[in-house]
Image (spheres, rainbow, N blue to C red):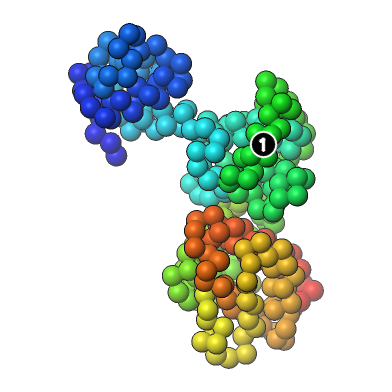
Amino acid sequence: MIEPIKRGARGPAVEDIQKRLLMLGYDLGPTGIDGVFLGATWDAVHAFQSERALAEDGVVGNETWSSLVDATFRLGDRLLYLKFPYFHGQDVRLLQGAMNALGFACGNPDGIFGAFTERAVREFQSNIAQPGDGIVGAETVRAIERLRHVWHDKDPSAPVALKVAPARAADLLARRPVALLGLDEIGNDVAARVANLAIATEPSAVVAVDDDSMSDVAMIIRLGSGIATQVGGACPRLVVESVEDSALEPRLLTALSAVEGSREVVIDFVPELLGDDAARQRVAVRMLDAVCSALSREGEMW
């Protein structure tokens, strides 16, 4: 929640609003960015609200502020990836238009980074020999910018009629419960990210975090860092030593098949690999892909 900013207000918050209005091409008059919410600034806010179908009261409350922020995000301002609630904004809309124009269909550019947008990004990344993780970071943004001459000024919705590729095994996520159990802070964080990704892919996904009491659970995955010697029993263990571990899917399948009748596995991450948001999200993407792959081959293993 923000304190509503009304006509006559002054200060840094007003300057921030003025900067965003200027970015969007609104005329603030001769005074420009002066930190005073009067005259041309109030008119610009009112015009912005009118164009965005917002309440035309000239007050910058939560809805108007959120819309201003969304409208002024530039591609590369933040890390974009599939999560719920979805990322949304002008940077996502620009990304979608670029993907469509480059031939990686993600549907109508609506400014919402959903499952089909992630799928398009992953196909684009694989096409340019980048890790196909669907995470739009600095390297992917640079690749898109290098191709600006191809997609700039093109119809951003041109290939909307093309068939949009399915996103993961959404039907399996909805039908087969999976339990994710964190064994430490890193494990808890990755487990929560995998569950969030599953819900962002398929809202009816049945993925529980820190709860292995579900009936008819398809698999139980325990996640942590440096814990391979701390968990007893005959549970298979899989040590992940690289964020870019492209072999994670077959290795998870092997681990789940190693002990007859077992649907439980321990994933042990090398701690220093997961020190930032991008690395943890990248591992979560790999994990969910591996889970979906295992679910799709469930009949072959058990």
Relative to 272, does residue 54 appear above or below in the rendering? Answer: above
The count of marks equals 1
Residue drawn at x 67%, y 32% as measured from the top left:
98
Q: Nearer the viewer, residue 262 or 101?
A: 101
Residue 58 visible here? no
Q: Amino acid at mark 1?
A: Ile
Residue drawn at x 41%, y 19% as measured from the top left:
22
Q: Quadrant of the N terminus?
A: top left
Tell me where residue 164 appears, x and y as whole percent: 73, 40
Q: Residue furthest toward the right? A: 300
Tell me where residue 283 appears, x and y as whole percent: 59, 62
Please give the residue where the numbered disc 1 appears in the rendered image: 144
Residue 230 visible here? yes
Q: Secondary structure at mark 1?
A: helix
Residue drawn at x 46%, y 32% as measured from the top left:
70
Relative horizontal placement of residue 286, taking residue 69 as reference (left or right): right
Relative to 34, does residue 142 appear above or below in the rendering? Answer: below
Tell me where residue 106 appears, x and y as whole percent: 68, 37
